[in-house]
Amino acid sequence: MPLDAAATTYLLRHGDDNLIESQRLCEWVARAPRIEDDVALLNIALDHLGHARELLTAAGNREGHGRSEDDLAYGRNELEFSNAILFEIPNGDFGQTIARILTVAAWHSTLYRSWVGSDFVELAEFGPRGVREADYHFEYARTWAERLALGTDESAGRFRAGLDSVLPHVGELFVDDTVTDRLGAEGWVTSPSTLKDECIELLTSCLGPLGLSVEPVATPVQTPGRLGHHTEAFSPMLAELQYVRRAFPGGSW
Amino acid sequence: VNAGLPLLERARAAAEAVEDPELVDVTIGDLGLVRDVRQEGSTVIVELTPTYTACPAFEVIRDDVLEALNVAGIEYAAVVRRLSPPWSSDWVTERGRAALQASGVAAPRERASGPIGVQILRAPVYARSESAECPVCGSDRTEVTSWYGSSACKSLCHCLVCDETFESFKTVEESRL
């Protein structure tokens, strides 16, 4: 696989992860338990959108066919999206959403840290700022994880059920494939499989003291999301995300 | 404007005087967003670093800088967005801190003692007090009521003395990565 093709695919994956996470969190607008958390969830969504813009723009530049961030976000179909399944699973209740934010933030904090100083210049540029923003999401989710897990039987049960829905999808993030192998051989990225322990350790630093376990996280043999094979819940979400651009092609205001 | 100054000084002065679109009387120079002004051929390049990657005001700021450079008589100019090294609230100037405080937004803490994501955010958030100075009464007895405010760079605080609610510019220490 040519290096530029691998680099483009890698940027697209992580751009898509952020775009889809942002869209899911946006579904919380005006629905969160309190206005402070409404604002928080949407701020986190905005961070993810900013990260998606950065990474999709970089992917378009690497690809070299003149595709903009908007072309990539609004112009592709389901099969062309390479986000991991973790990011597209429905929000569930607030407990499940907090479980996902916590998990996603632990992953991003670990991933972006590995980008710092990389010879893959787009990643090196993004890394330090990305780590900081992911850490802030993690700490926000942690405070809610504590309150839910140590709160009432109802809140603890819901948070635990949320984790049970989220954690089975984490394994996909740690799978090495031809793309990461190619970039890894060049010394540009760390293999996802070697980021697993650090990510799980970070998650455990929050969940362990609450009596909740992360292990075992199985590394699956397949990466459906990365290959464009999405869940049934994905299409309606993508339709909503892309509606305006498809209804008014080329429209501007 | 400043016609007697050399080109790059004139360009820097024009760029730094652009007001942040989401704040009152606070310039992007005050916030430390202008990282470099240089010349490449006949083009003046201004490097800007956003406070947060997703800052939605960035495009407006970029356009305002280009406009300001144009008004300053600089014919060819470009703005380059730079994320690394990441912006730090340590880059906010003294004038900027005073301007924030005067506009009702608490200035970030000076020279934070640790990375914000690691040190100050460990305690349960709503019980935690932070040393933001109330922009209304000047008291240090304040607490964070919400980590997130009306923009990515601000959180929401409450003054325990005068009971006022106010926004606080988040403290972001310089990256050690």
Image: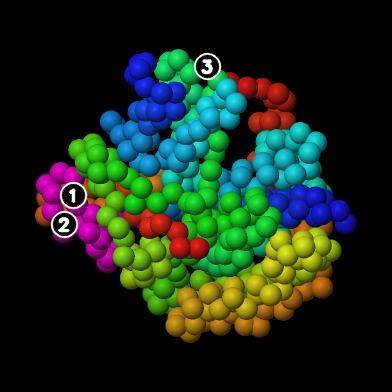
Report x, y in % for residue B45: 53, 31
Report x, y in % for residue A133: 49, 56
Secondary structure beneath dot 1 equals loop
Which amino acid type is shown beneath numbered disc 3?
Answer: Glu
Dividing the picture into quadrants, the one containing residue A107 is bottom right
Whether residue A252 is visible, yes or no, is yes
Closer to the N terminus: mark 2 or mark 3?
3
Secondary structure beneath dot 2 equals loop
Closer to the N terminus: mark 1 or mark 3?
3
- In front: mark 2 or mark 3? 3
Residue at (37%, 28%) from the top-left corner? Answer: B13
Per the model, the C-alpha gap separating discs 2 and 3 is: 48 Å
Q: Which stretch is magenta?
A: B126-149
Dividing the picture into quadrants, the one containing residue A188 is bottom right
Say whether residue B40 is left or right of residue A242.
Answer: left
Asked whether the residues under the numbered discs 2 and 1 touch, taking CB atoms below 8 Å apart as contact, a structural biologist would say yes
Residue holding disc 3: B75
Residue holding disc 1: B134
Residue at (28%, 31%) from the top-left corner? Answer: B25
Chain ID of residue with mark 2 = B
Which amino acid type is shown beneath numbered disc 2?
Answer: Asp
Whether residue A230 is visible, yes or no, is no
Label 3: few (<14), some (14–19) or many (≥20) C-alpha neighbours in 10 Å: few
Q: Which mark is residue B140?
A: 2
Is disc 1 in the same subunit as disc 3? yes
Q: Nearer the viewer, residue A131 or A74?
A: A131
Say whether residue B106 is left or right of residue A228.
Answer: left
Closer to the N terminus: mark 2 or mark 1?
1
Location of the N terminus of chain A by quadrant is bottom right
Per the model, the C-alpha gap separating discs 2 and 1 is: 6 Å
Residue A182: say if magenta.
no
Location of the C terminus of chain A by quadrant is top right
